[in-house]
Amino acid sequence: MAAQVGVELHVRRRVLSIDRGAHALHTDAGELAYSRLVLALGADPIRLPIEGDAAADVLSVNDLDDYRRLRARLSQQPREVAILGPA
């Protein structure tokens, strides 16, 4: 998806400093130049108060690790999925 929208995505990188004047990030992997910068720091998922015998099977997809768990679960049977979220 990043390639489709023309984004260069760096995951699991520690930003040591940001030089706004030079449009450069100093990271644990070296210096990165940027024209526009978005820092996606993540968020805690909203946990809905779900009850029932399958409540433990409800997944939140909020980062790449969550997405990998979802993909692994989708490879199993059955594969019915319900997506909950704001309209």
Image (cartoon, grey):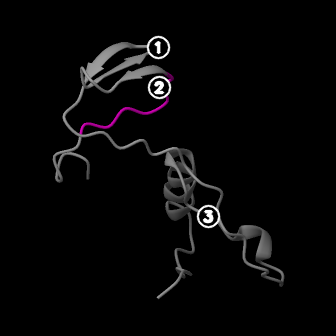
Question: Which class describes the residues within 10 Å of circle 1: few (<14), some (14-19), or many (20+)?
Answer: few
Contact (Cβ within 8 Å) of mark 3 with mark 2: no
SS class, disc 1: loop
Inspect the magenta stretch and tell me whether residue 14 lies in it: yes
| x, y percent for residue 6 | 16, 46
| x, y percent for residue 14 | 51, 23
Q: Which mark, residue 28?
A: 1
Contact (Cβ within 8 Å) of mark 3 with mark 1: no
Query: Going from the N terminus, do you reach mark 3 or mark 2 first?
Result: 2
**Is residue 20 toward the left or the right of residue 3 in the image?**
right
Q: Which mark, residue 13?
A: 2
Give the residue at x 73% y 77%: 48
Q: CA distance from mark 1 to mark 2?
A: 6 Å
The rendered magenta stretch, by its main secondary structure, is classed as loop
SS class, disc 3: loop
Question: Which class describes the residues within 10 Å of circle 3: few (<14), some (14-19), or many (20+)?
Answer: some
Part of the protein shown in magenta: 8-15
Q: CA distance from mark 3 to mark 2?
A: 23 Å
Q: Amino acid at mark 1?
A: Asp
Give the residue at x 47% y 25%: 13
Residue annotated with mark 3: 60
Up-down relation of residue 2 to residue 71 (above or below)? above
Q: CA distance from mark 3 to mark 1?
A: 29 Å
Give the residue at x 65% y 57%: 44
**Quadrant in the rendering for residue 30:** top left
Contact (Cβ within 8 Å) of mark 1 with mark 2: yes
Q: Amino acid at mark 3?
A: Ser
